[in-house]
Image (cartoon, rainbow, N blue to C red):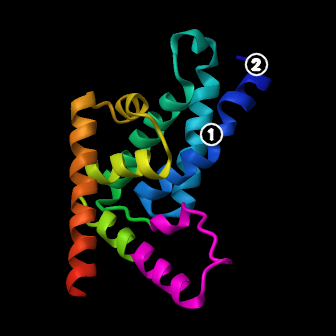
Amino acid sequence: MNLAAFQTRILSAKSKLFRFAFRLLDNEEEAKDVVQEVFIKVWNRRERMNEVENWEAWCMRMTKNLSLDRIRSRQRRAVDSIDDHFDVSTAALSPQESTELNESMQRITLFINSLPEKQRQVIHLRDVEGYSYNEICEILELDMNQVKVNLFRARSSVREKLIKINAYGL
């Protein structure tokens, strides 16, 4: 892999890698360090370019593994705000609608953060980052059924909590 291929294939995924690492680590500086470490490892293994089918998924898996290593070393769980990842235009909304939307996004963020780690990772990769089921399988090193079950459970849990809040105001 030459520098141009590295820039187009790997560096183009920089923001996705950073968001994923930040979601896991909840620390901007550590997330930047993880992404930089991933780039260094990829660059050092550029001769093996033909062995890797999906570079972005491979980089995401490496980001996940390095982030989890850092979490284990500091014995701490990571959280993130989902509304940072959505670009919701509030210009056409009334102040009341805008406030309700922001409150809903905050609730969803809290609900997602309260999910078990695997469910949180799967829902983030699928619904925030937009990865396919196959890519999520490759990134998280899970089989398809585990991905689908975790995503279903995560969405169901968030949906139930939203319905309960909207129905009862709790």
The span from disc 2 to disc 1 (Cα, nearest Å) is 17 Å
- In-front residue for pair 44/58: 58
Which label's residue is closer to the chain start, 2 or 1? 2
Vertical comparison of 76 with 102: above or below:
above
**Which amino acid lies under the numbered mark 2 shown in the image of this protein?**
Asn
Vertical comparison of 75 with 56: above or below:
below
- Residue 145 belongs to the span the image colors magenta: no
Checking the image for residue 13, the label placed there is 1
Which residue is tagged 2?
A: 2
| Residue 20 in the image, given as x and y percentages of width and height | 48, 50
| Residue 113 in the image, given as x and y percentages of width and height | 32, 65
Vertical comparison of 40 with 80: above or below:
above
Indicate the secondary structure of the residue bearing disc 2: loop
- Residue 104 belongs to the span the image colors magenta: yes
**In this view, which residue lies farthest toward the right?**
4
**Which amino acid lies under the numbered mark 1 shown in the image of this protein?**
Ala
- 103 horizontally vs 84: left or right: left
| Residue 117 in the image, given as x and y percentages of width and height | 27, 53
- In-front residue for pair 66/167: 167
**In this view, which residue lies farthest toward the top?**
50
Magenta extent: 81-106
Checking the image for residue 160, the label placed there is none
Count all numbered tags in the image, as a single digit: 2
Residue at left offset 43%, top offset 31%: 135
